[in-house]
Image (spheres, helix red, strand yellow):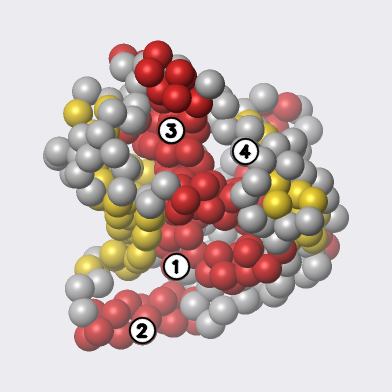
């Protein structure tokens, strides 16, 4: 329960932070989309840990396509994507076996299931987002064929708004300080979506902005979403550029009981590409749903 996203274009992610591997199964993808493992490299690199201002965990995050693709094109069948956990260190969390960390899902997972994976948060770890990014690559390819683009970038670190090179340098210094001294800071990501035609979205309970908000709020650490005023009206796209701000809390477990754990001083530097992926998955699903809204569209396909 809760591991599958979408209604027609669906994504199920699996795996834990320090398990053997993580991955995703994408279903509902049309046949004939050009896809190979090299297509995943750019976005996976953007989310990859081990950079100067992120967690010191080092993962290549290479994606292996297990099914759903033949001779470089999608088959229309489920696409299984696998990402190995190479730099797993479960022993770093041995002291947390009987401790619930503040600000994490340790207690709530235990309260729900009566059994939890304490190794870096298990399923609740930010590591899970690598699978989302991989699935998002496929959604972006579909949207690209329709002329739709999605771009997200860091817009704020702590109380520093990134508006020019000078503010970006201040933000880098703050992140270096946070990582060196063992504290964390809040952050924001700004996402822009262009090329979505008017009329995409569903009425009442499945509004496009409601589903986008759900998708983006499902990213670990997300705390609020802000939309612009005119791109989605009554839950349906107006054809204007969509602008969305996603705010993240300071990461937990920085300098607390997880002394050996490896954590980011801020979420946004690696969350921008995750936001793009979740927006892409939402839009792709809604566009596919849209064909049931008008008979003339069904006739054109038929």
Numbered disc in front, either 4 or 2: 4
Q: Is residue 23 visible?
A: no
Name the N-terminal-most of marks 1 and 4: 4
Q: CA distance from mark 2 to mark 3?
A: 42 Å
* Residue 56 x, y percent position in the rendering: 63, 75
Q: Nearer the viewer, residue 297 or 29?
A: 297
Mark 1, residue position: 269
The reply to whether the C-beta atoms of the residues labelled 2 and 3 are less than 8 Å apart is no
Mark 3, residue position: 287
Q: Nearer the viewer, residue 82 or 1?
A: 82
* Residue 242 x, y percent position in the rendering: 26, 46
Mark 4, residue position: 30
Name the N-terminal-most of marks 2 and 3: 2
The reply to whether the C-beta atoms of the residues labelled 3 and 1 are less than 8 Å apart is no
Q: CA distance from mark 3 to mark 1?
A: 29 Å
**CA neighbours of label 4 inside 10 A, class few (<14), some (14 to 19), many (20+):** some
Q: What's the mark number on residue 140?
A: none
User: SS class of the residue under badge 3?
Assistant: helix
Numbered disc in front, either 3 or 1: 3
Side of 208 where 254 appears, left or right: right
User: SS class of the residue under badge 4?
Assistant: loop
**CA neighbours of label 2 inside 10 A, class few (<14), some (14 to 19), many (20+):** few
Mark 2, residue position: 173
Name the N-terminal-most of marks 4 and 3: 4
Numbered disc in front, either 1 or 4: 4
Name the N-terminal-most of marks 4 and 2: 4
User: SS class of the residue under badge 1?
Assistant: helix
Side of 135 where 145 appears, left or right: left
Name the N-terminal-most of marks 3 and 1: 1
Q: Is residue 299 visible?
A: yes
């Amino acid at each position: 329960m809760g591991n599958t996203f979408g209604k027609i274009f669906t994504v199920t992610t699996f795996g834990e932070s320090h398990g053997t591997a993580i991955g995703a199964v994408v279903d509902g993808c049309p046949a004939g989309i050009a896809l190979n493992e090299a297509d995943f490299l750019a976005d996976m690199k953007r989310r990859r840990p081990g950079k100067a201002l992120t967690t010191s965990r080092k993962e290549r995050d290479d994606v292996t396509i297990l099914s759903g693709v033949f001779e470089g094109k999608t088959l229309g069948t489920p696409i299984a994507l696998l990402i190995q956990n190479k730099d797993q260190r479960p022993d770093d969390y041995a002291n947390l076996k009987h401790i619930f960390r503040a600000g994490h899902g340790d207690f709530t997972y235990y309260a729900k299931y009566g059994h939890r994976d304490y190794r870096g948060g298990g399923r609740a770890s930010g590591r899970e987002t690598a699978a989302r990014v991989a699935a998002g690559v496929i959604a972006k390819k579909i949207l690209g064929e329709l002329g739709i683009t999605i771009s997200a970038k860091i817009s704020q670190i702590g109380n520093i708004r990134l508006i020019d090179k000078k503010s970006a340098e201040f933000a880098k210094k703050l992140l270096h300080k946070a990582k060196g001294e063992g504290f964390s800071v809040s952050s924001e990501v700004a996402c822009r979506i262009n090329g979505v035609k008017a009329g995409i979205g569903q009425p009442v309970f499945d509004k496009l902005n409601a589903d986008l908000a759900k998708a983006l709020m499902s990213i670990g650490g997300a705390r609020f979403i802000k939309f612009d005023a005119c791109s989605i009206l009554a839950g349906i796209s107006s054809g204007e550029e969509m602008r969305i701000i996603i705010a993240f809390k300071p990461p937990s477990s920085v300098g607390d009981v997880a002394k050996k754990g490896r954590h980011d001083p801020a979420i946004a530097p690696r969350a921008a590409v995750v936001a793009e992926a979740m927006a892409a998955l939402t839009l792709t699903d809604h566009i596919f749903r849209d064909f049931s809204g008008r008979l003339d569209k069904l006739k054109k396909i038929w």
